[in-house]
Image (tube, coloured by chain):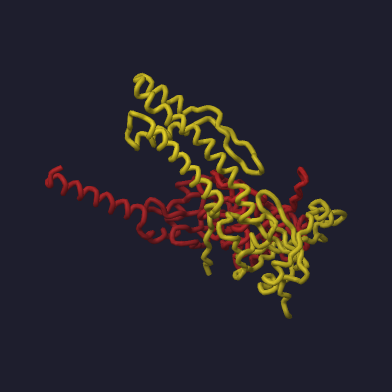
Chain colours: A red, B yellow
Amino acid sequence: MTKKKMVPLAAVVLAAALFAYWFYFSKPSEFPANEQAVAEINRTFPKAYSRTIQEAIRIDDRHMVLPFISKVKNYGLSYWVWRNHKWNVVSVDTNGKPSMWKIDPTDPSSYYLIWNLQPDHPLSSINFYLIGEREYHISGGIEDYQPKVQMKKKIFLQEKSYGAVQLPEQWTASINVLSQAESAQNPDVLTMDMFPEQSMFIGWIPYDKAGKESNIMFEGPSYSSSYEAIEELRPINESDMERP
Amino acid sequence: MFPINFTINFPPFNVATAMAGLGAWGVIIFFAYWIYKKQTAKPKVWKIAAVVLVGFFSLSFDVNMFGTAVKLSILPLGVGILYYLLNKNKEKWQTYRAFAWLGYLANFIFLLFALLAIPVHHVLYPANEPSTYLANVEDASIIAIHPTAKESNIHIESLKKQLPLLKQRPIHSDVWYYEMVKDKEAKERDERFPNLLTGTISKWGSGLNPLIFIEADGKGILLSTPKEQFYFRSGASLLEEEVK
């Protein structure tokens, strides 16, 4: 190739690289104002009927959660990701049920518990639980015992009936240990299940103002759609908890 | 407020397996060289390598041998493909035939070395020795995975002192299970192993990454590897009782 042709080619490659860098890696821009955010939610998911943004909760540079109130007084959640040089609504749930967002599915320390409950419903707190069942197996003279896992995280709802918290450090540590042991057992797991071996899950119990287990109901129309690793958490009963 | 957490997603380094892999490659290269020497036609080395690699391709199924999952090749697909491609020129096929079959044979060389690695691994890293799994306990700590766990941490000096004195005991998984569960409501249940031990390092090169549970009384260790579990008892408690 002649020198004459090299120069424009190099320029094109450089321009493409700069554009790719700007498009994929540049710092996220200012988050849209509330009215704009409402419009964006309704444009992406028309059935959300979002009307008021309660707060813009920053998870990290590129992830936001915006709890909102809909036209019919539903308390919902919208999940936002900075991607392709734009803030995108990647999931909307009009019921605001407690869910977990796995920002990086391979790293449990990036998992967040997120909720938005009706404030007129008299709840005072939520207990979140990391649960793994006690099990035993005997086959061919080989015995195996899996201890019960039950770890608790209490959240108070006095000030706000919505919020987002990172998984407690102790949960992250035990999930890491338990799932690492699993990856040694089954090195070519292509499916990125969160808790493959121990059939572990995260559940939640709501408590009312009197500190008693509440049977909160989610009424009204619900609509949700998700492109991300967001999982609804399992409602559980206190009667199933050991040594509550 | 954001703890840094590294999740190791690759399986830990296993010396016996690595040596077996190297040994198998050595034998394959030796055979390839031997065939090359005997032949009058001397093809290019990269072509030989390509033919051996294609020859390696085979239809196989997984079988369990001595507790290890291995691939048993049954149909030399690669040899078939090479025959189809090269037999138009009889001389060419004559040149490459032996290398193609060597590729297929390589499957069995790998299998043989993988089986040889099993007893080697057993000698280097005895499965029922606690020191295999607890080679370094300097950074050990415990996570309470059940509400009945005592508020205490691991006593590292005690653990080090007790390691050579630990006695292996039989696992009675069904007894343990029903002891916790039988005639008891969930809220009355204890857990025999309410602590998970983290931060310990297995013997270098063992590739082992067991779950380690500490018994409620602080005197028992349950080691859970993907293949089997081991249970050890110590004379003194391994827990640092919290002074309050």
Say above or below: A154 vs A37.
below
Specify the quadrant of the image occupied by residue B167. bottom right
Q: Is residue B223 visible?
A: yes
Percent position of residue B219, x then y: 76, 67
Nearer to us in this view, B170 or B219: B170
Residue at 71% across, 74% down? B240
Percent position of residue A174, x then y: 63, 60
Please tell me how many numbered marks the rendered image carries. 0
Residue at the far front: name it: B38
Percent position of residue A234, x then y: 67, 51
Say above or below: B39 vs A133.
above
Q: Is residue A67 visible?
A: no
Residue at 45% across, 55% down? A37
Residue at the far bottom: name it: B244
Residue at 66% across, 65% down? B143
Q: Which quadrant of the figure contains the C terminus of chain B?
A: bottom right
Percent position of residue B224, x then y: 68, 55
Nearer to us in this view, A76 or B47: B47
Specify the quadrant of the image occupied by residue B50. top left
* In this rendering, position of residue A64 left or right of residue B146: left
Say above or below: B4 vs A179.
below
Nearer to us in this view, A222 or B133: B133
Nearer to us in this view, B133 or B106: B106
Residue at the far right: name it: B183
Residue at 73% across, 80% down? B243
* In this rendering, position of residue A234 left or right of residue B186: left
